[in-house]
């Protein structure tokens, strides 16, 4: 075989591979779009129902010792963002967000005191995750000025969310769950082909603090 024919054979192989890759990506894109539309429609409908029900929230505590009053979930809102992918407009991510407020009355003030680094980090992380309004004070020894503890004065109000981000090339959807079981962050990825009514029902159960197999 001449050198030119070798190059032709190599070029033909590459073209075939690229055509197969393109077909695979297009198939994955279509499957992912279908799944993302299902997620968005489901979350929109879920938001409407939960805004009427105002379900009870799970237990919340910044330090794991000082419980918040009984909370409830409200003000659910679903949203979506799009982007261009291989010259097509696709859903980039969809999200559901909500407020966590006292079940009775308005948000009230609370105080926690921590004096060990692990406890401090836990409280700081939870405050950041929940965007909790707070003030931090350093308690020092009156004579030596040595740091003795940290005091956090906070308001019992936070928020939760679920975000589903599409990977059209891999046909996967990455879910990010914030504060669906108290202060926590959970990440899990599902194949687009497995996103269906049953899967999303499991997600809804987790949001309303029922036993769930979603994550």
Image: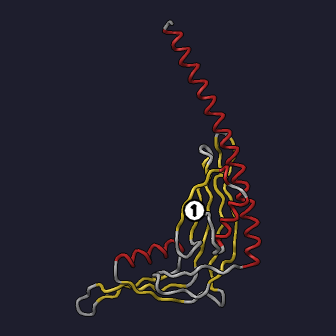
Neighbour tally class for label 1: few under 14, some 14-19, many 20 plus, Cα within 10 Å: some
Residue 5 is left or right of residue 199, and the answer is left
Residue 202 % position (x, y): 67, 65
Left or right of 120, for residue 77: right
The residue nearer to you, when weighing 192 against 148, is 192
Residue 44: image location, x then y, percent: 74, 64
Residue at point 56%, 59% (across, down): 188
What residue appears at the point 46 percent right and 83 percent down from the top-left corner? Answer: 135
Number of numbered discs: 1
Above or below 147: residue 213: above
State the residue lying farthest toward the top.
2
Q: Is residue 29 left or right of residue 64?
A: right
Residue 3 position (above or below residue 81)? above
Image quadrant holding the C terminus, namely bottom right
Q: Position of residue 143 (x, y in %)?
A: 23, 93
Q: Residue at x 68, y 68 (%)?
A: 204
Q: Quadrant of residue 25?
A: top right
Nearest to the observer: residue 42 or residue 82: 42
Secondary structure of the residue carrying tag 1 is strand
Q: Nearer the viewer, residue 173 or 150?
A: 173
Q: Which residue is mark 1?
A: 176
Give the answer, above or below, for where 147 lies relative to 187.
below
User: How is the rendered protein coloured?
Assistant: secondary structure
Q: Quadrant of residue 151?
A: bottom left
x 60%, y 48%: residue: 167
Side of 156 relative to 114 (left or right):
right
């Amino acid at each position: 075989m001449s050198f030119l024919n070798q190059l032709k054979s190599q070029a033909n192989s590459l073209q075939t591979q690229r055509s197969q890759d393109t077909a695979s990506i297009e198939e994955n894109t279509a499957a992912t779009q279908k799944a993302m539309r299902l997620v968005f429609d489901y979350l929109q409908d879920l938001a409407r129902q939960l805004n009427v029900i105002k379900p009870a929230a799970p237990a919340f505590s910044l330090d794991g010792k000082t419980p918040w009053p009984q909370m409830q979930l409200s003000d659910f809102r679903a949203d979506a963002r799009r982007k261009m992918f291989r010259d097509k407009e696709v859903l980039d991510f969809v999200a559901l967000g909500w407020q966590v407020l006292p079940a009775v009355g308005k948000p009230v003030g609370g105080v926690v005191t921590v004096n060990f680094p692990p406890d401090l980090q836990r409280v700081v992380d939870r405050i950041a995750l929940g965007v909790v309004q707070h003030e931090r004070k350093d308690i020092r020894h009156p004579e030596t000025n040595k740091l003795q503890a940290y005091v956090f004065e906070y308001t019992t109000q936070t928020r939760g969310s679920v975000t589903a981000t599409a990977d059209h090339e891999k046909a996967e959807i990455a879910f990010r769950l914030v504060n669906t079981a108290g202060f926590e962050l959970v990440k899990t990825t599902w194949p687009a082909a497995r996103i269906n009514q049953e899967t999303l029902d499991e997600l809804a159960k987790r949001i309303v603090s029922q036993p769930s197999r979603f994550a």
